[in-house]
Amino acid sequence: MRGKQQLKNEVPAIEILNVDLCNWKETKEAIKTVYPIDLLVNSAGVGSILPLTDVTEENYDHIFNVNIKALINVTQTVIEDLLNRKSPGSIVNISSQASLAALPNHTLYSATKSAVDGFTRAVALDFGPNKIRINSVNPTVVMTDLGRRFWSDPNLAGPMLAKIPLKRFGEINDVASTVLFLLSDEASMITGVCLPIDGGFLAC
């Protein structure tokens, strides 16, 4: 709630909806109350760092419901509005470098983010003729408040940083600036792209 209030303080005109994204019908109805929507960022997500042998059905259901089912539902609802209005649009999905490179004990998380990338490309193909663009960004570790708490341990951060040529983790603005570019008309010829924001991690 504190994060929502901080956002409201920074941008008073923003309208905040409280909805359980795992509830398909409730989410659809909530989104329809704020039509029209021309630009969408699918940023909701949960992480999971578990060895495969510890994965439970509950783990599976939770992460897939949030990371891919909810994303598909929100995207479908927004695209329906764009099609009804015969309007162009731009959508950016927040994916992860974990969809493009194997990371230890990321089996469930990697699977969901790979699904996000595949969905991104498929939707880009289907709705490009309607001038609806969809891309994903695939960040490395990003130093959000949670990221700083989790990755401040040198024993954990060291091996990951050693694989990043720029020798740092991402900052929020690194991702936000890229998302804004992909949403904008400056990226009008870009669709179906899964763009790493990883300091060169995938180049190694």
Image (cartoon, rainbow, N blue to C red):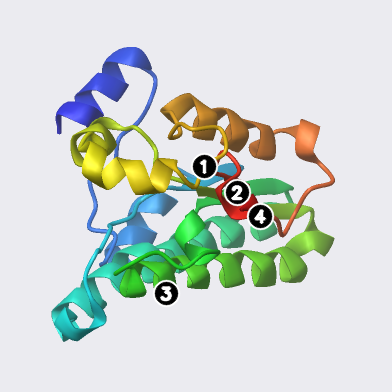
Question: Which secondary structure lies at badge 1?
Answer: loop
Badge 3, how many Cα within 10 Å: few under 14, some, many 20+?
some
In terms of depth relative to the viewer, which is nearer, 201 or 61? 201
Point out the tag, 4 or 3, that comes first from the N-terminus: 3
Q: Residues within 10 Å of mark 4 (few under 14, many from 20)?
A: many
The amino acid pointed to by label 3 is: Ala
> Residue 177, located in which quarter of the rendered image?
top right
Cα separation, mark 2 vs mark 3, equals 17 Å
Mark toward the viewer: 4 or 2: 2
Evaluate whether residue 37 shows in this view.
Answer: no
Q: Identify the mark nearer the N-term, 1 or 2.
A: 1
Direction from residue 55 to residue 33 in the image, left or right: right
Residue holding disc 3: 111
Q: Which mark is residue 134?
A: 4
Kindly identify the residue that appears in the image at 50 percent across and 73 percent down. Answer: 115
Answer left or right for 13 relative to 199: left
Q: Which mark is residue 164?
A: 1
Task: Give the secondary structure at mark 3.
Answer: helix
Per the image, the residue denoted by label 2 is 196
Choose the circle earlier in sequence order: 3 or 1: 3
Give the amino acid type for the residue marked by disc 1 in the picture. Answer: Ile
Callouts 4 and 2 close, C-beta under 8 Å: no
Question: What percent of the width, then of the height, locates residue 147?
Answer: 28, 38
> Residue at 31% of width from left, 32% of height from top?
144
Is residue 19 found left or right of 203 in the rendered image? left
Mark toward the start of the polypeptide (4 vs 2): 4
Circle 2 SS class: strand
Q: Nearer the viewer, mark 4 or mark 3?
A: 3
Instruction: Please tell me which of labels 2 and 3 falls first in the chain.
Output: 3
Residue at left 39%, top 38%? 142
At which x and y percent is residue 8? 29, 21
